[in-house]
Image (cartoon, grey):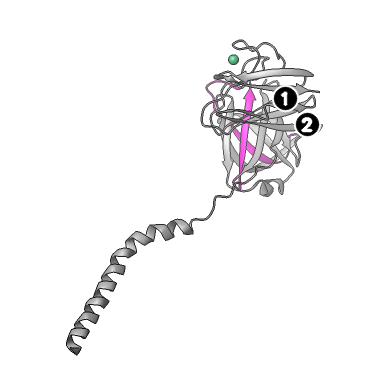
Amino acid sequence: MNKTISILIVILVVGVGVFFYFRKPAEAPTSGIEKESPVVEQKAAEPIVVKLAALKDSGESGTATIFEENGKTKVLLSIVGAPKNTPQPAHIHAGSCTAPGSIIYTLASVANGGSDTMLEMPLKNIMDKLPLALVVHKSETAMGTYVSCGDVRGTSVGSTGGAIEVATIEISDNGFSPATLTVKAGTTVTFKNVGTGDSWPASAKHPLHLVYLDQDSCFAGKFTGCGIPGGGSWSYTFKQKGSWAYHDHLRSTLFGKIIIE
Ligand SMILES: [Cu+2]
């Protein structure tokens, strides 16, 4: 009798052991999911916009847009009048445009009117090194010739030293946000494409975009963004007062309005 009970206990223990042994793999993925940390969305700070002035009659001017993204610093250059087939090295130098010092950060060379660099540090690390000057060089073989330069300050400033206002419009695949933006004349508006598709903000009316005519962009004298890939940005300074309708030239069901006071 005792023998039978012992055998039953052994069978029970082995049975329970086998049950838990085979149950374990099914449990593992569940506990793995529970351990995953929640996704924290980081709110981006206002971009610093630096006006790049043409040097020595180079005819090359534009903007640098500097902003923090996930603890790193994005530097986007948009240059008008750059040569088509010559990459132009760009750096952030110590000092100012009147007396640039040594190179502190190397940026991606300007090609096809722009440059896109991610510096592996938060924006604060860069601002701690002010004063700085953003310099575009003529070519890899003519580094000594500076074609465009802008002084980087703690806040956004024009090449003449006057403070400029900045604003940001986010472009998702569903439209512009805010759809209506009211700013002061002289404000530089950065269009940030947070969607996946290409975007092309452009003045009314499609397809010629002739309503708001002013400074050069990628098309002479027009407010038109030429095509901003997903994740990219483009800046434009609005000087003329009025209510200016625009649309996405590539997705002409998306509309926005900029009111300049
Ligand atoms: Cu259009």
Instruction: Say the numbered circle drawn on residue 164.
Output: 2
Query: Which residue does the image show at 77% across and 30% down from the upper left?
Result: 158
Tell me the crowding category of disc 2: few under 14, some 14 to 19, or many 20 or more residues within 10 angstroms, Cα based: many
- Circle 2: residue type: Ile
Q: Are marks 1 and 2 in contact (CB under 8 Å)?
A: yes
Please, which residue is most extreme toward the front here?
Answer: 1
Instruction: Say the numbered circle drawn on residue 237.
Output: 1
- Foreground pick, 69 / 73: 69
Q: Which residues are magenta?
A: 70-97
Q: Quadrant of ligand 1?
A: top right
Pick whichever of labels 1 and 2 is earlier in the sequence: 2
Q: Is residue 8 left or right of residue 250?
A: left
Does residue 3 show up magenta in the picture?
A: no
Q: Secondary structure at mark 2?
A: loop
Disc 1: residue Cβ within 8 A of ligand 1's nearest atom? no
Question: Is residue 216 among what the camera can see?
Answer: no
Q: Horizontal and vertical percent for residue 187? A: 76, 28
Does residue 92 show up magenta in the picture?
A: yes
Question: Is residue 235 among what the camera can see?
Answer: yes
Q: Horizontal and vertical percent for residue 257? A: 70, 22
- Foreground pick, 250 / 236: 250
Query: Which residue does the image show at 54% across and 53% down from the upper left?
Result: 38
Instruction: Say the numbered circle drawn on residue 2.
Output: none
Query: Which residue does the image show at 58% across and 50% down from the upper left?
Result: 40
Q: Magenta part mainly helix, strand or loop? A: strand
